[in-house]
Amino acid sequence: MSLTGIILAAAIVGGVGLFIGVFLGVSGKAFAVEVDEREEAIIGVLPGNNCGGCGYAGCSGLAAAIVKGEAEIGACPVGGAPVATLIGEIMGQEAGEQARMTAFVKCAGTCEKANQDYKYYGVEDCTFMSFVQNGGPKSCNYGCLGYGSCVNACPFDAIHIIDGIAVVDKEACKACGKCVATCPKNLIELVPYEQTHLVQCSSKDKGKQVMSVCKVGCIGCKMCEKVCPSEAITVTDNLAHINPEKCTNCGLCAEKCPKKIIL
């Protein structure tokens, strides 16, 4: 190829490149979407975990929703009260009181305390158990399966399988709700961090049947309900429930419970 050909080819390539650059620059300005400065500021104070615990597609999605008034300024479960305060300052609003929450597993049926119908060998995933005989080897149909779907879902390493059941580390938990959504047995719920008395069972079977499969399951005896001075406990469907808004953490229910299932 002659020198003239080389120069011509280089000029054409350079010209095309210049044209594309100018075109993209002009298009970028013409079609640019203006972002509210408050939205960018909120993204800056959010944790950046993009866990989805707020119900939006990551931190940027939540920031946009807050600016539009579609989400509360305290909607980030990971950031909690400190982040809510900063967002409130950006939005010019009062953050209000933000109660810290944590995940809680409503099962105490460890390997020693809960019976098993058979020995299981196979895929260790809780969601897969719906395809397994009797919904898994554990005799209690309401109990934690212990195969760690919630562990895999947690982005903060706050939940682990210990002695056959899922256990939450309250200090590491950010209440994002990933484990709650993942558990096929609906055994995990978000509760106030300060709540110290919780029923660690989900069985709705009658007392005799509960005792035949688990040493610590709630038998619905109503002893806790009778002794509670603040009427915070009710027994429904053979299972005790504690209302955290009424509970004073006096501990009488835990002392009276014959199965010692109130944590």
Image (cartoon, rainbow, N blue to C red):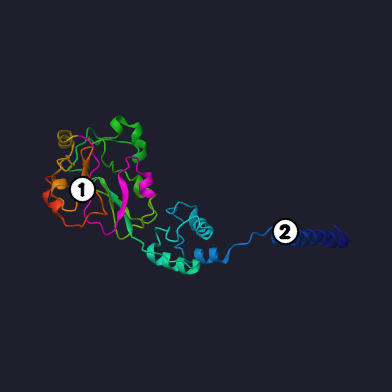
Q: Is residue 23 magenta?
A: no
Residue 20 location, x and y as percent?
75, 58
- Report the amino acid beneath label 2: Ser
User: Could you tell me which secondary element the residue under label 2 belongs to?
Assistant: helix
Q: Quadrant of the N terminus?
A: bottom right
The numbered dot on residue 249 is none
Can you say whether 113 is above or below 42 in the image?
above
Magenta-colored span: 178-205
- Secondary structure that dominates the magenta span: loop
Q: Is residue 198 left or right of residue 68?
A: left
- The residue lying at 26 percent from left, 59 percent from top is 194
- Report the amino acid beneath label 1: Ile
Label 1 or label 2, whichever lies nearer to me, is: 1
Q: Residues within 10 Å of mark 1 (few under 14, many from 20)?
A: many
Q: Is residue 194 magenta?
A: yes
The one nearer the camera, 172 or 263, is 263
* Residue 4 figure quarter: bottom right
The one nearer the camera, 68 or 208, is 68
The residue to which callout 2 is attached is 27
In whole angstroms, how far apart are the C-alphas of marks 1 and 2? 63 Å
Residue 107 location, x and y as percent?
24, 45
- The residue lying at 16 percent from left, 55 percent from top is 251
Can you say whether 72 is above or below 227 in the image?
below
The residue to which callout 1 is attached is 233
